[in-house]
Amino acid sequence: MLRSVAEQDIDLEVLVANASPEVALPELPGPCRILEVDNHGYAAVVNQALEDASGEIIVICNCDVVLRPGCLSRAVAYLRAHPDVGVVAPQLANGDGSPQHNGRRFYTWLTALWARCPLRRFVPRPSFFSRYLMADEQCDAPRDVDWLIGALLVVRRTALVHPSRAFDPRYRFYMEDVDFCLDMWQRGWRVVQLPEIMATHLHRRASKKVLSKPGFHHFVSFMKFLLKYRGLPQRAT
């Protein structure tokens, strides 16, 4: 990830939020600062790093993402050309090059139940879940989406609810990206996916196993989301 960041054609301030100080980091390519942060969950770690960031445009990037050449400069150019857009993301691809459905519609009760159903791997994907993944429509131009997977987000700092807070720290793992994008829409900012720029996301999908620690964290965060919004809100159209 850091090698691909160092090769981008744009000036960057690179911050590495290290929540595992007991792990020896390898030699890192390119200029970057290491921030030793408390591990209170992914949302809190991102917020701690944001307190040290100085840029007006923030790139939130997971360590399992590889950026394609020109990815960030084109995303930044889109934000500057569209002042009503709060956050953009490229089209993500899996390691084998197949498209990853990182632009999605908000959950409904039906899609939430299907996503947690252990039998879903053995039957064809139903049409309502294809609609949730936005796989039911062609993606060949910038499009508004309900929410974006948080593996790679390019965010306008002035669109944040607070300059040093991107995510709600109540979410330890998962759902912070859904909540983030919902908040953007509710405060009048657009959320846009840019299919003409690409990045690779080596997504392990650890939470897909319902009876696992990641699956438990996903369930807890989902319940926090339900309590916060008193249900599953949808974007106004």
Image (spheres, helix red, strand yellow):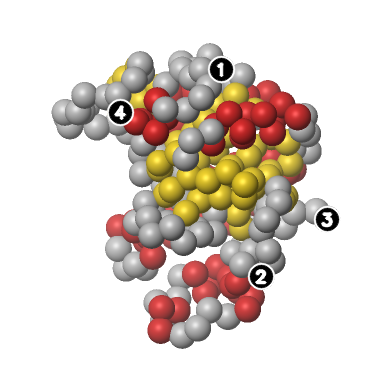
The residue drawn where x is 69% and y is 40% is 184
Q: Please give the residue where the numbered disc 3 appears in the rendered image.
A: 237
Mark 1, other Cα within 10 Å: few <14 / some 14–19 / many ≥20: few
* The label number, if any, that marks residue 136 in the structure image: 2
Q: Quadrant of residue 137?
A: bottom right
Q: Earlier in the sequence, mark 1 or mark 3?
A: 1
Task: Between residue 156 and residue 36, name the one nearer to us.
Answer: 156
Which numbered mark, 2 or 4, is in the foreground of this view?
2
Task: Between residue 231 and residue 5, name the one nearer to us.
Answer: 5
Q: Quadrant of residue 154?
A: top right
Q: Secondary structure at mark 3?
A: loop
Q: Earlier in the sequence, mark 2 or mark 4?
A: 4
Q: Residue 33: in sight, yes or no?
A: yes
Is 185 displayed left or right of 11 in the figure? right
At label 3, the amino acid type is Thr
At label 1, the amino acid type is Gly
Q: Earlier in the sequence, mark 1 or mark 2?
A: 1
Q: Please give the residue where the numbered disc 4 appears in the rendered image.
A: 18
Q: Earlier in the sequence, mark 4 or mark 1?
A: 4
* Rendered location of residue 3, percent (x, y): 34, 31
The residue drawn where x is 37% and y is 55% is 95
Q: Residue 162: in sight, yes or no?
A: no
Q: Earlier in the sequence, mark 3 or mark 2?
A: 2
Which numbered mark, 4 or 1, is in the foreground of this view?
1
